[in-house]
Amino acid sequence: MNERSGRQKPMSNTMFKMISLTATVFYKVMNLSRQLQKSGVRGGQTVLDFGCGSGHFTIAAARMVGDNGKVYALDMHPLAIEAVKKKVAKEGLPNVKTILSDRDTGLPDESVDVVLLYRTFYLVKDKQELLDELHRVLKPDCILSVLGGGVADCLKAVGKDGRFLLAEHGKRFLNFRKVKP
């Protein structure tokens, strides 16, 4: 993780554990697969779960993309990465790779079919730099999906420069399509 000034630092371990526990309870009643279907996740795709937390959507996405797909689980918190690795091992999912980072994915240009930005956007310090990175890794005409936590702010920030077009607006989620360069 890069410690340069201007880079974001993870929350405390205690706060992360509290949020993870709350998320576990919440996601037990939520149909994760249905939300991922709304985002366009399907077999054989490459998905980036940005701000993956303890990996609830990562695991569901890994099952959906199957053996021919890949899921990258990125988070800046080391406990998040540990939690995802444990779940992946327990579930026997070889198609998940973790990335410990606050923003930079290290992925090749235009290599991702769907970016999941779930309950994360409002926490991001430099939203424009994040959008630059997500635009870079997303394939043309593919999906940036945003769920909860700052949807209104995201709608303003993402739509302002014309690189993403709003494709779908649900009650608590947004899907943007990357505009071809």
Image (tube, rainbow, N blue to C red):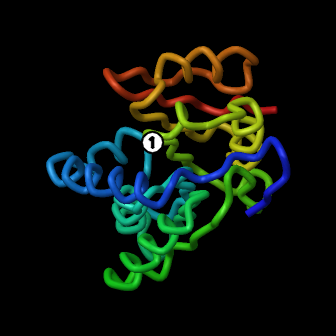
Q: Quadrant of residue 130?
A: top right
> What amino acid is at disc 1?
Tyr
Q: Is residue 140 left or right of residue 29?
A: right
Whole-percent x, y for residue 142 in the image: 60, 41
For the point 51% across and 55% down, the residue is 12
For the point 40% across and 80% down, the residue is 86
Q: Please determine whether, in this image, residue 4 is positioned above or below residue 178.
A: below
Q: Which residue is identified by label 1? A: 118
For the point 35% across and 45% down, the residue is 37
Under circle 1, the secondary element is strand
For the point 55% across and 48% down, the residue is 114
Residue nearer the viewer, 167 or 11:
11
> Within 10 Å of the Cα at label 1, are there few (<14), some (14-19), or many (20+) other Cα atoms?
many
Of the 4 image quadrants, the one containing the C terminus is top right
Badge count:
1
Whole-percent x, y for residue 6 in the image: 80, 41
Whole-percent x, y for residue 166 in the image: 55, 21
Whole-percent x, y for residue 143 in the image: 56, 39
Q: Quadrant of residue 57?
A: bottom left
Q: Is residue 158 left or right of residue 42?
A: right
Residue nearer the viewer, 165 or 59:
59
Residue nearer the viewer, 176 or 12:
12
Residue nearer the viewer, 131 or 177:
131
Residue positioned most to the left: 29
Q: Is residue 175 left or right of residue 100?
A: left
Residue positioned most to the right: 4
Q: Is residue 84 left or right of residue 60?
A: right
Q: Visible in this render: residue 77?
A: yes
Of the 4 image quadrants, the one containing the N terminus is bottom right
Q: Visible in this render: residue 42?
A: no
